[in-house]
Image (cartoon, grey):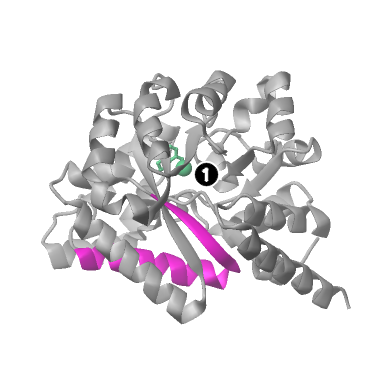
Amino acid sequence: MVSEAFIRGLPKAEIHLHIEGTLEPEMMFEFAARNGVDLPFDSVADVRAAYEFDDLQSFLDIYYRGADVLQTEQDFYDLMWAYLERANQDGVRRAEIFFDPQTHTQRDIGFPVFMDGFLRAIADAEAEWGISAALILCFLRHLSGEAAVATWEQAADYHDAVVAVGLDSSEVGNPPELFAEAYALARAAGARSVAHAGEEGLPEYITGALDALGAERIDHGVTCEDDHALVERLVEEGIPLTICPLSNLKLGVFERLQDHNLKRLLNRGVKVTINSDDPSYFGGYIGDNYVAVAEALTLDQWDLVRLARNSIEATFLGPAVKERLITELETYVASLDQ
Ligand code: ADE
Ligand code: ZN
């Protein structure tokens, strides 16, 4: 077994992380108190006890209610700052971070409130720890394609402040094709594109995300294994999968971590990465995900270095910065091999 310290210290990127999913119960209480929001829980322990999910929808129902406590620019700042501080401790050098604007605009919280909070925290964290971060604007797929277009238009002042657009929320019954117009607009404005697909949904959702949305990475994508031709395509086109093992476990996508297909996909040449999704809800940050999978699937040092390298290659950083991070990774590994 590779040591936990080695795994946590690996220079890596996190590219599947919902900032609203980093709201720890302690923070939930703090924000609720300062904003005068009533919570349906008496204690932090009560909140944690409620985090037992049967599937994606049962999680989302609780998750969207939790986000109600986020109200002021300072709340969004504090949330982002706390995540980046934690990620830095896990060797994260680059984070590409999802946010759900519609969860906030629906509550009459405007783009400047959350965007200015996020961007200020990102700038401060970069100055403090040298960690690099970028934002991915996600459309909620339980809402309509027209609502996604309207959201992109509402975000006009911040188009240059997001690196990509994404698609999240309830997958089954909400296929990617419904969001083609919003993606076309965003891509025409220079945004890169990613989409959740194949978390619970059929492999067709992955193909749809690639073809209708021009997705450059697939978030989750674990159901691709049911379609051999699709797996070949992912390998040939070098499409990264942003896999979130503890999330898959908590939401019942795999019954046991030992059953996870991450290692099989890695061995078949798919550009697999490890990420935390919604760490405060799923019981672990990125380092915990790496450590849990290393143990459950008996990954060796080279698998783990491959996963860290994939994560850097899968970012939207330019080639020179990627190269610098890969050199940092190689230097780290070489120094420990001595
Ligand atoms: N939003 C936050 N976490 C998500 C997940 N795992 N799948 C879809 N939407 C999400
Ligand atoms: Zn996700």
- Give, as a single range, the part of the protein colored magenta: 73-98
Q: Residues within 10 Å of mark 1 (few under 14, many from 20)?
A: many
Q: Give 289 or 97, whichever is nearer the viewer.
A: 97
The residue lying furthest to the bottom in this view is 128
Label 1 beta carbon less than 8 Å to ligand 1: yes
The location of residue 231, given as percent across then percent down, is: 71, 27
Residue 79 in view, yes or no: no
With 69 as the anchor, is 218 left or right in this view? right
Q: Residue at x 35, y 30 (%)?
A: 141
State the SS at label 1. Answer: helix
**In the image, what residue type sits under mark 1?**
Ser
Residue 254 in view, yes or no: yes
Q: Residue at x 35, y 54 (%)?
A: 160
The location of residue 209, given as percent across then percent down, is: 51, 27
Quadrant in which the N terminus is drawn: bottom right
Disc 1 designates what residue? 247
Quarter of the image where one finds residue 4: bottom right
With 249 as the anchor, is 29 left or right in this view? left
The location of residue 286, given as percent across then percent down, is: 56, 58
The location of residue 333, given as percent across then percent down, is: 79, 70
With 193 as the anchor, is 1 left or right in this view? right
Q: Residue at x 67, y 71 (%)?
A: 9
Q: Residue at x 51, y 49 (%)?
A: 16
Q: Give 82 or 283, whichever is nearer the viewer.
A: 82
Which quadrant of the picture is home to ligand 1? top left
